[in-house]
Image (tube, coloured by chain):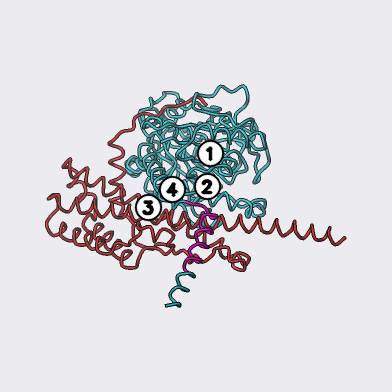
Amino acid sequence: MRIGLVSPYSFDTPGGVQFHIRDLAGELELRGHYVSVLAPAEEDTELPANYTSAGRAIPVKYNGSVARLCFGPRAAAKTKRWLEDNRFDVIHPHEPIVPSVAMLALWQTTTPVVATFHSAQLRSRALQIAFPMLRPSLEKIDARIAVSDDARRTIIEHLGGDAIVIPNGVSVANFSTATPQPQYSGVKYGGATPTIAFLGRLNEPRKGLDVLVKAVPQILQSYPDAKFFIAGKGDEGEAEAKANLGQYNAAVQFLGGLSDKEKAEFLKSVDIFVAPQTGGESFGIVLVEAMSAGAAVVASDMGAFRRVLDEGQAGWLFRTGNAEDLARTVISALSDNKLTFQKQLAATNWVGQFDWSNVASQIEAVYEMVIETKAATPPGDLADRVIQNVLERRLGANANLGANDD
Amino acid sequence: MISVWFLIALFALMVLGWILWKTATRIDKLHRKVVAAKISLDQQLQRRAGAAIDLAVSGLLDPASALLIANEAYAIADSLDPIGEPEFAMELKGLSMARELGESELSSCLRQVFPDETAITDIRANPIGDELMYRLVSTWYRCELVRRFHNQAVADARALRRHWWVRVFHLAGHAELPETCELDDAMSPALAAAAVVRANREGAGENLCYPL
């Protein structure tokens, strides 16, 4: 198959959607498909051979946060050329209602379309106003994929209709076979002290770092030697967390951003992975990564996380935003070894469904069916049908006249 | 003066006409999408029934289960809709009631024959059984997909046809209102898992990681 993937966000900055597209492209190529990715990119960025730049992404305030988007006539022209040059069997824009390249591709395409919706927040007044204009584009989508039940519910509420749920993919083996690193290793790998990890952008309040920071003193009361590792970029968030930690700073280490390999090793090594996000998550890929690596996951009990953790069978849940409950949960996860082991075993089985080998097969099935369905489309356009209709009626009328004559 | 007003009116009329034509085209496209999805769904359901029959006659099931599955699957062959025929090319009604019932019964029968993982694992211990089981669950999953495409297209078409101006100007012509296709195609968790295990065994290998 000739497949065109479209990313609304630039690959110059990392993000869940970009990672998903990159990994999906890799997996599809391994399966022998022709894959091309269209995404915004800076002019001096060197892109792999099958990536095409749609132009620069510009920081724009959209939906309450600043997103780097790519739009305008030049981007539209580049998108059109990409579509024409590659003659795809199917195109697969991601987040087609974010005003960026994916929307432009959808607007201009005539090939079958599979669209993936990642976000669980669509509510925006601009979208309501622009909706009638987007309708014709949205009608072009042959198959809608939502990455989670939460994303699906958002689609049903805001766009009408339905969507198939296919989760985000993870390369489970990359995490399960990572090498544990002694500097992060906790009691699981024979260390003396338990280690607790956080991973996420530090500047974004909804990632919930301050919930963890507030829980640190209470955890240290029960486990005075516990070590905390905070990974992720964000200088302001780091400074703020340090100020709030005060005397407990010694127990917490900030690691900054991690590469993919470092991330896998980090998650593999630590005893507990804490996901204290307070909202706005539609899936929680990092939870699946932590489960794949074998860390015990302690997460907020918001809808998306509950489902990713199999309603708490594959991990521990605490009341969203409640630092005290987080501390209590971490302490029980550290003390109840039997239950933790049981949950980790359940998690190992549970993550299989998120492995790329499975996720990509499902997406491939969607491509196949969309292409097959398109092939079954009756030929002719509206003009043909009107002419045919008129002719038939003329003929029908003549036939009737003939019948009356008899 | 009159001629200026006349020109303005003419222009407005042309714009209105253009909008109406565009909308009518959109409706027509959606109608064709509905028909295409229905044809595709019909084919896919037939493939599923075929896969079920293959499994039933393979000799790998107990005779009672085999007979039950074959009975349901052959019943579908008797209630086929003449969807592929050219004169039905623009028929917007869904599948017939008899067909929907038959397909739902096949689903329910298969769920009963394969209630849990052990029932499936037994079949798949045999390489032929593994292949037949894989064909069943993969065609089944594709049925679920296509039915959703179909109902989505129906929902889009109906949403567009609800507007008063679409109705006043008869933009949908004489086409009947498309209907969704309602049938029970839910896979049991055990059957859904069968698709997963097979996919994992195929082993797509390690991911290529591109530098970001």
Which numbered disc, 2 or 4, marks the residue closer to the eye?
A: 4
Residue for badge 2: A324
Figure quadrant of residue A78: top right
The percent position of residue B58, horizontal first and vertical second, equals 14, 49
Separation of disc 3 and disc 4 at Cα? Answer: 9 Å
From this viewpoint, which residue is outermost toward the front?
A406
* Above-or-below relation of B97 to A128: below
Separation of disc 4 and disc 1 at Cα? Answer: 56 Å
Residue for badge 1: A216
Residue for badge 3: B40
The percent position of residue B206, horizontal first and vertical second, equals 36, 28
Dot placed on the residue nearer the N-terminal end, 2 or 4: 2
Q: Please say if the residues under marks 3 and 1 sit with CB atoms less than 8 Å apart.
A: no
Q: Within 10 angstroms of label 4, few (less than 14), some, or many (20 or more) residues?
A: some
| Element carrying mark 1 | helix
Dot placed on the residue nearer the N-terminal end, 1 or 2: 1
| Element carrying mark 4 | helix
